[in-house]
Image: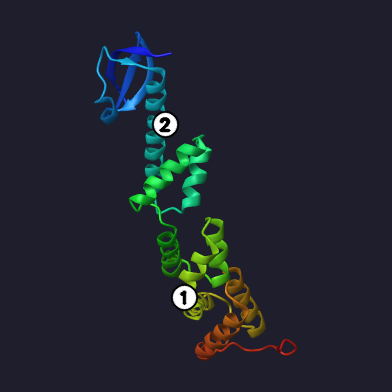
């Protein structure tokens, strides 16, 4: 059933939105831009009302997604999951995602590169660890392999190992190696890379003397 617009009132808490009253009662809210096309006394059909409400639902979901993206880049899957948790209907979610993709605000390739660069700078990981993290973010396997193609895992492992090694006790070479190995393994570095890097770090720190106790030789 349609109705006549009896009032258009700017919301007190959000000046960018307008409350629409039909036949003397609040009916729904719209963005100020959308409300500009309406006027008091205008008759709205049931179909027009449904269309306005659907457009506003998408707009509110879009604004919610923009807020979510304001903290850091997000993957498509992260945005979709976030909107699902907010109770957004599937068709509205897909419309919002398509709109965000068109303006370049979500891009899984760009997101994967951002994630890799961030990890390289602050908390380096091995390829195994990075694959796991990116899969958890919903990134497609093909994209993951693409961005990892030129990733220098050994260089990343070396930076991590050297920083960690300087904080480990060096009175027992076997214990030292195990702790360093385990630390790198937890960060997702491959076995061969760990072996190479641990040997290199040991050699570079040799002047600090890492004695091997009898009975504990490897």
The N terminus - image quarter = top left
| Residue at the farthest right position | 215
Image marks 1 and 2: residues in contact by CB distance under 8 Å: no
Q: Quadrant of residue 172?
A: bottom right
Q: Position of residue 40 (x, y in %)?
A: 25, 14
* 192 displayed left or right of 80: right
Instruction: Write down the residue under mark 2.
Output: 57
Pointer 1 residue: 151
Report the residue at 60% width, 84% height from top: 195
Pointer 2 local density, CA inside 10 Å: few below 14, some 14–19, many at least 20:
some
Q: For the residues carrying marks 1 and 2, which lies nearer the camera in this image? A: 2
Between 108 and 121, the one nearer to me in the picture:
108
Could you tell whether 171 is left or right of 134 in the image?
Answer: right
**Secondary structure found at label 2:** helix
Coordinates of residue 212 in the picture (x, y in percent):
66, 89
Front residue (pair 175, 7): 7
Task: In this rendered view, identify the residue nearer to me: 194 or 39.
Answer: 39
Image: 37 above or below 141:
above
- Residue at 57% from the left image edge and 81% from the top image edge: 193
Mark yes or no: residue 170 visible.
no
- Which quadrant of the figure contains the C terminus? bottom right
Q: Check disc 1 and report its element: helix, strand or loop.
A: loop
């Amino acid at each position: 059933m349609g109705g006549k617009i009896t009032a258009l009132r700017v919301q007190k808490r959000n000046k960018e939105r307008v409350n629409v009253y039909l036949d003397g009662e609040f009916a729904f809210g719209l963005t100020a831009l959308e409300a500009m096309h309406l006027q008091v006394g205008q008759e709205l059909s049931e179909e027009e009302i449904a269309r306005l409400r659907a457009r506003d639902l998408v707009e509110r979901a879009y604004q919610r997604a923009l807020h979510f993206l304001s903290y850091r880049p997000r993957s498509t899957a992260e945005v979709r999951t976030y909107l699902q948790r907010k109770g957004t209907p599937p068709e509205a979610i897909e419309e919002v995602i398509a709109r965000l993709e068109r303006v370049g605000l979500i891009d899984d390739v760009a997101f994967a590169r951002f994630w890799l660069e961030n990890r390289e700078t602050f908390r380096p990981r091995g390829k195994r660890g990075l694959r796991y993290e990116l899969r958890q973010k919903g990134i497609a396997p093909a994209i993951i392999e693409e961005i990892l193609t030129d990733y220098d895992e050994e260089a990343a492992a070396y930076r991590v190992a050297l920083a960690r090694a300087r904080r480990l006790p060096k009175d027992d070479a076997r214990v030292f190696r195990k702790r360093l190995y385990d630390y790198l393994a937890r960060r997702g570095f491959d076995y061969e890379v760990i072996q190479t890097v641990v040997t290199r770090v040991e050699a570079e720190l040799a002047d600090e003397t890492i004695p091997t106790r009898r009975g504990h030789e490897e």
